[in-house]
Amino acid sequence: MSADHGGPAAGPAARVRRLEALLEQRGLLDTELLDRALGAFLDSASPANGARLAARAWVDEGFRRRLLADANAALPELGLSMGGGLQEQRLKVVQNTADRHNVIVCTLCSCYPLALLGPSPTWYKSEAYRSRVVRDPRTVLREFGFELEPRVAISVWDSSAEARYMVLPRRPAGTEDLGEPELAALVTRNGLIGVAPL
Amino acid sequence: MNDVGGMQGFPPVPQEPDEPPFHADWEAHVFGINSALIGRGVYNLDEFRDAIERIPPQEYLASSYYERWLRAITMLLAERGVVTEEELAGG
Amino acid sequence: MADLFRIGDRVRTRRTDPPYHTRLPRYARGAAGTVTDLLGRYPLPDRRARRLAAEPEPVYAVAFTAGELFGEGDHTVTIDLWESYLEPAEAEPRGGDAAGAKALAREARK
């Protein structure tokens, strides 16, 4: 079977090309629009957004409070939003403290704050992560090289409905002199999901 | 097969440093096609998740994440008579 | 129609095992937890997936102790659950994690 056919033996790339052609014929898809939308999404959505939110929350106490109380209302202050997707999703930001560490999962599929952080990492979608982090988060964190002090309690958030979650990591010590962009550069995607301290 | 929270026996979490947002163009296109079809109301998000859950277990387990998405999309389109499997296979 | 539950309420998830799409994870069925947040109103996905009419109903963030869910562990798991998945819990949780439940309820009221 030639690679241009979209049958079961064809690889997914061929099937997708075939599917797009058929959908376009039926007026259900505009591939140019699709390419533009994908490009726009990848350009605008990345962990840098979450990192900026964290940095602002660290330097601005009022913003931190607003972000925790109503994240959707606070996002536009940084020119961000949870819209742009299928519908604007409710965002909840959960903050790490000296006593409590947060970690996010979607055990049922792979729900994730895409509009804010971009596509999720493959490990987040894996059965291994989704099955184990709700039962034994401390061990999962250890697999990410993150040894959490025993006295710190862990809160796992299973995004099973319409809300999407993001972690506000703790500001590291010794960063008093850093400006917002430098602070943001310290924050990683893993920290915003909760499998790393930062 | 999707409801794995708390299930025991899975291995350590697989990690891939600096992975790209999509591992192949077709994955990105599957993502985009799904958004477009849901946006147009061909099916809704809950129907999409349900379709993934209806993939026969053997096939589900043998498929990658976006292969499952592709399977669910084609399943829904076939069920709605929008695109048949023959059309998808034909040249 | 008013919400059935408020923040701080003890609730128990239903034990149903439907043959169709649902967003009540198996690991949390029949478990008692504490409502910690109100997340808005949305149509029940169990019905939406089958194209059945579904009025928006409240969705709650419900916190469970690991002990309640798995019989071990010292963490909590918060799951976002539609009202249809929940019923009021008894005053004290079965299986005795009363201290954990009270701590969660205190935490939710902060």
Image (tube, coloured by chain):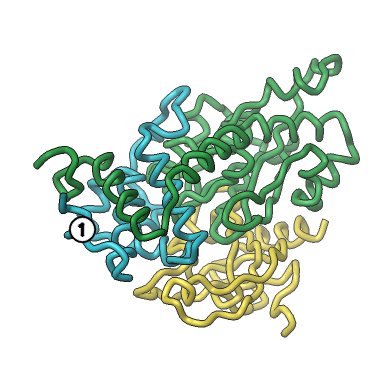
Chain colours: A green, B cyan, C yellow
Badge 1 element: helix
| Residue displayed at 39% across by 75% down | C18
Name the outermost residue toward the right: A62
- Mark 1 residue type: Glu
Please determine whether, in this image, residue B65 is positioned above or below residue A139.
below
Residue A183: image location, x then y, percent: 75, 22
Locate residue C86 relative to residue B56 in the image: left or right.
right
| Residue displayed at 34% across by 49% down | A20
Location of residue A116 by image quarter: top right
The chain to which mark 1 is attached is: B
- Residue bearing mark 1: B87
| Residue displayed at 47% across by 40% down | A35
Q: Is residue C18 visible?
A: yes
Locate residue C62 relative to residue B80 in the image: left or right.
right
Name the outermost residue toward the left: A1
Please determine whether, in this image, residue C66 is positioned above or below residue A146.
below
